[in-house]
Image: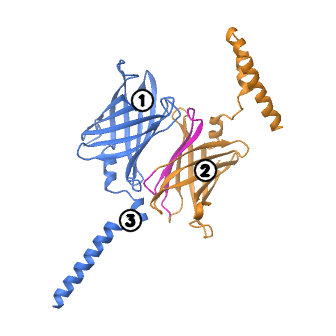
Amino acid sequence: MRLLITLGVVFAVALSYLAAPVQASQEKTGTQAESDIKAVQPILPDPQKVLDQLVGNWTYTAKWWDAPQSEPMEWDGKFKAEWVLDRSFVEFKARADSNERDYEGMGFMGYDNVTGKYSHIWFDTTGTGMWISTGRYNADKNAITDTGKYSNPASGKRDWYKGVTTFSGEDVMSYEFFIKGAGGKEFRQMEILYKRVK
Amino acid sequence: MRRNLTLTFSTFVTALALIFSISAPPSKAELSEPGKAHEVLGKLEGSWDYILKWWDEPGAEAGIASGTSEKKLIMDGRYLTMNHKGTWSGEAFEGFGIKSYDNTKEEYGTVWIDNLGTGLSVTSGSYDPKTKELTESGTTTLTGSETPYRGVTTFVDDSTYTYEYFITYPDGTEFRHMVVMYNKADDIGGA
């Protein structure tokens, strides 16, 4: 099926090139032009609809592993996400509920129309640097995967990381944080499970 | 003799401690906490009025815009948030920025977003206490393409500072696209 769609798109692109001289001499109606464009462009979900899934009040449970086989540290918290700047970005605010863990974080996520990528900013009380990552949306998984580098107070270096935000339903989402461990192998250091507050 | 030995030993220990403090990398706690360098962020805290001029290209007539900027240190002084509200070409303008001093990079950093576009403007740089200039460079997509730029914040006095925004053209030449003049807003609620 996917092959048929691909062939169809290739055929449509080829047709559009063959028809180009004719198009140059003829004024096409808006409706015809629009349908041609739709025929050659892949159908991507509206980024605002993708980001809309984040918006709301959430509770979360986080798990953190210092090493792949270690016991995770766990804590709960509250997370709020809302549109700001005329719906250009979604603003995040997070706070841990635990008295033992005094944690506060803030961030933004948006879709850059120039680069065609999602952008993600995060800053919190675990350090003094900002986490800036960019990535893409996978419609099959309903997930945004972004990568970047962060100032890691534990290593004292700028380290690679990958974040995966997965929407499992209207009221459930998760964020997974991967770093590169021994031998450059990816290691999931953190998992946060969110439940929407109704 | 015993006193001399004690003095020698304590001098040795002091010397060792000094050497260790110079050569040892900063601890995780030191890298996680705000320090002396973060005081520069504090100089920007408060309510400000601004007037800005911008030029589309060299020699063009300047456009003028104005507004207010609320700057606040958050998370125990780790970061400075910057909320801008005003007008731009007759339209409502809203922008948000975050300034930091990253102890690991040993650099100041700024991320800026606003309602004129969907991209990030990201810069990093250093502060020169002699000239009182915080100079950062990076890239923005707010111009419609990935564009290198340089931002210079100059502290004039406690109630005045300026921000200059220089775009770098593909041939490497710089053009001052914008200058913003900030004045501390009157503290009406003061004593």
Q: Is residue B175 above or below residue B47?
A: above
Question: Which of the chains is orange?
Answer: A
Residue at 18% across / 91% down in the picture?
B2
| Badge 2 element | strand
User: Is residue B121 visible to us here?
Assistant: yes
Q: Are marks 2 and 1 in contact (CB under 8 Å)?
A: no
In this view, the residue in front, A4 or A72, is: A4
- Say if the magenta span includes residue A120: yes
> Residue at label 1?
B171
Q: Which residues are the magenta region?
A: A101-129
Mark toward the start of the polypeptide (1 vs 3)? 3
Is disc 3 in the same subunit as disc 2? no
Q: Three-letter amino acid code at disc 3?
A: Pro
Q: Is residue B131 above or below residue A194?
A: above
Between A150 and B47, the residue placed more toward the observer is A150
Q: Quadrant of the C terminus of chain B?
A: top left
The alpha-carbon separation of the residues under discs 1 and 3 comes to 41 Å
Which circle marks residue B96 in the picture?
A: none
Number of numbered callouts drawn: 3
Q: Chain under label 2?
A: A
**On screen, residue A22 above or below A49:** above
Residue receiving disc 3: B25
Tell me which amino acid carries mark 2. Answer: Trp
Percent across and percent down for residue B187 are 28, 38
Mark 3 or mark 2: which is in front? Answer: 3
